[in-house]
Image (cartoon, rainbow, N blue to C red):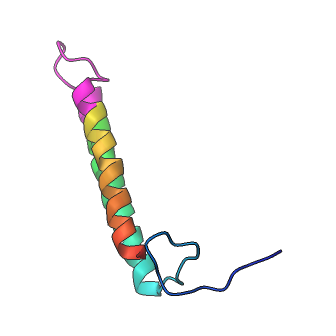
Amino acid sequence: MNERPLVANNIMRHNYRALTEADKLDMDKIKDAGLAFWDCCESIGLHGAPDKAPGSRELSLAKTKIEEAVMWAIKHVTR
């Protein structure tokens, strides 16, 4: 296999830097927080008012934004 060595970061990152243990812990915290918020949105969707659909557009948008927020926070940690 032709592996490239890890190099300093650049904007297009052909290679990734080695993550520290602190980086990995930060990523776990970010993902855990995102999952907790996701689960909260899921639970309010299940027992909302009778006139509200469980899979509302608003909850779908909220979940998409959670995914986006987690992605950007992870990008910050790994850059």
- The answer to whether residue 51 is left or right of residue 65 is left
Q: Residue at x 41, y 69 (%)?
A: 28
Up/down of 75 relative to 2, above or below: above
Residue situated furthest right in the rendering: 1
15 or 74, nearer to the observer: 15
Image quarter where the N terminus lies is bottom right
x and y percentages locating residue 44 in the rendered image: 23, 34
Q: Position of residue 22 (x, y in %)?
A: 40, 85
Q: Is residue 9 above or below residue 71?
A: below
* Residue displayed at 55% across by 77% down: 16
On the image, the x and y values in percent for residue 64 come to 33, 41
Whether residue 55 appears in magenta in the rendering, the answer is yes
Q: In the image, what residue occupies the spot 29% across and 55% down? A: 69
Residue 17 shown left or right of residue 50 in the figure: right
Instruction: Evaluate whether residue 44 shows in this view.
Output: yes
User: Which residues fall within the magenta stretch?
Assistant: 44-59
**Residue furthest top as drawn:** 51
Q: What is the total number of numbered labels drawn onto the structure image?
A: 0
Q: Is residue 50 left or right of residue 78?
A: left
- For image coordinates 39% across by 67% down, the residue present is 75
Q: Is residue 43 visible?
A: no
Could you say where residue 2 lies in the image, as x and y percent from the top left? 80, 76
Magenta stretch encompasses residue 41: no
Based on the displayed image, in which of its 4 quarters is residue 70 positioned?
bottom left
Q: Quadrant of the C terminus?
A: bottom left
Question: Which of the two residues, 30 or 40, is positioned nearer the viewer here?
Answer: 30
- 17, 63: nearer the viewer: 17
Dominant secondary structure (helix, strand or loop) of the stretch shown in magenta? loop
